[in-house]
Image (tube, rainbow, N blue to C red):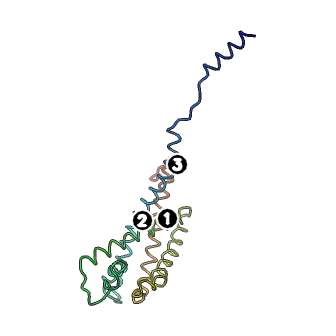
Amino acid sequence: MGGVHKALTTKRKKMPINVQSPTISSSHDIQPQRKRITRWGKGAFAGVIAGMLFMTVEMGLMKVFGGGNIWDPVRLSASITLGNRAVATSTPFTFDIFFIGMMMHFLLSILYAVILGMLIRKLKPAAAILAGAGFGLLMYFFHFYGLTAFYPWVVNSRNWIVVVAHLIFGMYAAWIYSHLHMRQLMHDAGLSPEAN
């Protein structure tokens, strides 16, 4: 019996110990952070492109149909930080108004695109575009009705051109984000986007 016990003890000592690889556990810790970075990356790209289209459409429609100066959208964005002096007609259109206006416009465009992306990431492209149109309309009412207590001068900028620009922003940002998200899913699944 003593020999059997000794043999079993020796066998236990030779059995390898299964230690979980620290690399695997660390990859799980990195995964949520990677998803957040990817979400902001897609949102930034979609926000910048859609923001450029927003500004181009709004300024172009104002040029064609009137309803204000083509630089009014930039002034309005600058008024978020500079106050109502940025939209006063007596104030010349200076470089600081242009710079601050464009900076605020694109920062908000990126933020809204990230929020929109979180809402539409599980939708198909067609449904995502429709949701983007609704999101753009909500943006319009939030900016020009919900914030009037803080920025009362925005009331003077309510018109159909601004509504169209917000709708286009929402739809285009949704289309870009949805397209990038689908490409990411296909890449993660080992599929080639060019093959489809």
Which residue does the image show at 31% across and 86% down from the upper left? 69
Of the residues shown, which amino acid type is indicated by label 2? Ala
In the rendered view, tell whether residue 17 sits above or below residue 185: above
Residue 196 in sight from this viewpoint: no
User: What is the secondary structure assignment of the residue under circle 3?
Assistant: loop
Q: Are marks 1 and 2 in contact (CB under 8 Å)?
A: yes
Nearer the camera: disc 1 or disc 3: 1
Q: Residues within 10 Å of mark 3 (few under 14, many from 20)?
A: few
Q: Secondary structure at mark 2?
A: helix
Q: Quick one: SS at disc 1?
A: helix
According to the picture, the residue beneath numbered tag 1 turns out to be 117
Mark 1 Cα within 10 Å, few/some/many (few <14, many 20+)?
many
Between 63 and 91, the one nearer to me in the picture: 91
Give the mark, 1 or 3, whose residue is nearer the N terminus.
1
Q: Which mark is residue 46?
A: 2
Measure the C-alpha gap from mark 2 to mark 3: 23 Å
The answer to whether 49 is drawn above or below residue 166 in the figure is above
Residue 136: where, in percent of width, then height? 48, 76
